């Protein structure tokens, strides 16, 4: 099979304006949440990325209608849903398929879902999802990699999350929307996409209060009706472009975003000496001084610094003179891509599985590298844009999961970037490739 590679000639300062797409992590949840709706949902601002195409296929396999009807608009009608089984290779590929557990349970009181996949950064448990379903009265077991969940009826209760989990918060919300009585989620995740899913469900007739705080209260309703909804802009795509602008010493207006969602990143960039100018729906990122200052970054659940921006941010830190420390507090093993940055001349050591120490200030040099996962792939692109010479990035299927028109948008900002077929596969890919 032909694979593809991105070829980037580094050293160009990015300049101009980029329009950010709809949030992938919100859209995946909203599409699956449509299963709860008895009617047609028109979802706008959906990015055309491979995770979305995969989900649409899975939703269709349940007997629902789902398709893109415009550039960024998906219509879904699950009125005639026929199956409670979401299984198969597509389900196993993406993490967001865990939302089929909550949505099918909520709608049909029964769900059989392949254990979800997603990027590999250590164990990705679902215990908090199952704990939430149990509190609502559902039983679950895992058999041959399939999670089976059933309930005679679902009755609201209080669910105390042991960890702050985006996935479990959304999943329990999905299961609770049509349950009897009140469900309370304590220690809920506050990420923008949690709020977006609650807003979507409310606009279809649900009664959810408190999304965006630690405590979400869901009063069950009898039925959800169809309607239209527009997904929020992608916080992580926006952050990736902001970092790329800073990394190339450029001047970029990152448009169609919610600046509030970017505060933790904007603050860190300012700390490093990068110029940040905020508008209602845009942020301009520009060079203020020739040298960047070092800084330490710790990832945290929202409103902290997002773990999904950790790889591009660590890449930017290689440019700042001195020692910077990146601490990963969300995932147990999210530094696998560091070896690729070091192949490009970075000096990063892993003190622990959760801490990377960067000796910054030396220039990166182009090299053939692999995208080890989605955001690590984005980091490779940022590194390539910063580097002297040509970088070839392999394993693009990871990047394609979450970045819409990545090359096209970068090209418009002046990047020297192209995509080519790889045939045959280079030897190093056979050992350093996907897991
Ligand atoms: N966790 C548990 N038990 C659970 C669920 C999670 O212990 O039942 C732990 C995880 O092991 C992790 C932490 O809780 O240490 C946070 O996991 P969370 O459930 O919040 O992650 P997720 O819902 O699986 C979403 C995003 C990820 C993003 C994380 C954290 C989607 C589809 N994925 O994953 O995004 O890293 O939240 O913000 O929304 C990406 O877009 O590249 C990506 C990986």
Image (cartoon, rainbow, N blue to C red):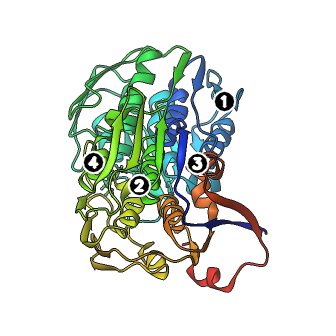
Q: Quadrant of residue 390?
A: bottom right
Element under disc 2: helix
Q: Position of residue 22 (x, y in %)?
A: 53, 35
Q: Quadrant of residue 381?
A: bottom right
Q: Are marks 2 and 4 in contact (CB under 8 Å)?
A: no
Q: Position of residue 148 (x, y in %)?
A: 48, 47
- N-terminal of the pair, mark 2 or mark 3, is 2
Say left or right for 134 vs 30: left
Q: Indicate the quadrant containing the N terminus: top left, top right, bottom left or bottom right.
A: bottom right
The residue that disc 2 covers is 246
- N-terminal of the pair, mark 3 or mark 1, is 1
Say which mark, if any, is on residue 301.
Answer: 4
Element under disc 3: loop
Q: Indicate the quadrant containing the C terminus: top left, top right, bottom left or bottom right.
A: bottom right
Between 394 and 73, the residue placed more toward the observer is 394
The residue that disc 3 covers is 413
The residue under the point 28% across, 31% down is 212
For the residues marked 2 and 4, what is the alpha-carbon distance in whole angstroms? 24 Å
Residue 69, compared with residue 255, is above or below; it is: above
Q: Position of residue 408 (x, y in %)?
A: 66, 48
The residue that disc 1 covers is 64
- N-terminal of the pair, mark 2 or mark 1, is 1
Of marks 1 and 4, the one in the foreground:
4
Between 168 and 394, the residue placed more toward the observer is 394
Of marks 3 and 4, the one in the foreground:
3
Crowd band around label 4 with a 10 angstrom C-alpha radius: few (<14), some (14–19), many (20+): some
For the residues marked 1 and 4, what is the alpha-carbon distance in whole angstroms? 34 Å
Element under disc 4: loop
Q: In the rendered image, is residue 152 in sight?
A: no
């Amino acid at each position: 099979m032909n694979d593809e590679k991105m070829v980037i000639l580094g050293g160009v300062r990015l300049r101009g304006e980029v329009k950010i797409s709809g949030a992938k992590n919100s859209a995946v949840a909203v599409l699956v949440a449509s299963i709860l709706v008895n009617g047609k949902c028109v979802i706008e601002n959906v990015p055309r990325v491979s995770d979305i195409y995969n989900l649409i296929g899975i939703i269709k396999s349940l007997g629902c209608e789902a398709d893109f009807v415009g550039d960024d608009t998906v219509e879904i009608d699950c009125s005639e849903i026929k199956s409670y089984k979401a299984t198969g290779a597509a389900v196993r590929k993406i993490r967001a398929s865990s939302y089929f557990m909550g949505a099918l349970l909520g709608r049909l009181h029964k769900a059989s879902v392949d254990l979800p996949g997603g990027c590999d950064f250590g164990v990705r448990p679902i215990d908090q999802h199952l704990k939430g379903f149990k509190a609502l009265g559902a039983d679950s077991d895992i058999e041959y990699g399939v999670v089976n969940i059933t309930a005679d009826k679902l009755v609201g209760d209080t669910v105390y999350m042991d960890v702050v989990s985006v996935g479990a918060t959304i999943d329990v919300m999905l299961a609770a929307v049509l349950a009897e009585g009140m469900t309370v989620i304590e220690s809920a995740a506050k990420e923008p996409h949690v709020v977006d899913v609650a807003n979507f469900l409310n606009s279809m007739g649900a009664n959810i209060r408190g999304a965006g705080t630690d405590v979400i209260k869901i009063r069950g309703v009898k039925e959800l009706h169809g309607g239209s909804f527009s997904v929020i802009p992608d916080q992580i795509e926006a952050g990736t472009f902001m970092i790329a602008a800073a990394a190339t010493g450029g001047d970029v207006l990152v448009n169609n975003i919610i600046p509030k969602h970017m505060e933790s990143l904007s603050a860190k960039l300012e700390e490093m000496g990068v110029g940040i100018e905020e508008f209602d729906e845009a942020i301009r990122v520009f060079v203020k001084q020739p040298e960047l200052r070092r800084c330490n970054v710790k990832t945290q659940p929202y409103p902290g610094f997002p773990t999904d921006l950790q790889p591009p941010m660590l890449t930017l830190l290689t440019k700042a003179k001195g020692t910077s420390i990146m601490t990963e507090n969300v995932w147990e093993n999210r530094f696998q891509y560091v070896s690729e940055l070091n192949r490009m001349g970075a000096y990063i050591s892993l003190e622990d599985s959760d801490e990377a120490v960067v000796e910054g200030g030396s220039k990166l040099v182009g090299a053939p590298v692999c995208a080890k996962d989605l955001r690590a792939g984005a980091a490779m692109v940022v590194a390539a844009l910063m580097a002297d010479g040509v970088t070839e990035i392999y394993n693009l299927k990871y990047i394609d999961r979450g970045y819409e028109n990545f090359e096209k948008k970068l090209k418009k900002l002046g990047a020297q970037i192209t995509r080519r077929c790889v045939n045959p596969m280079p030897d190093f890919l056979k050992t350093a490739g996907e897991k």
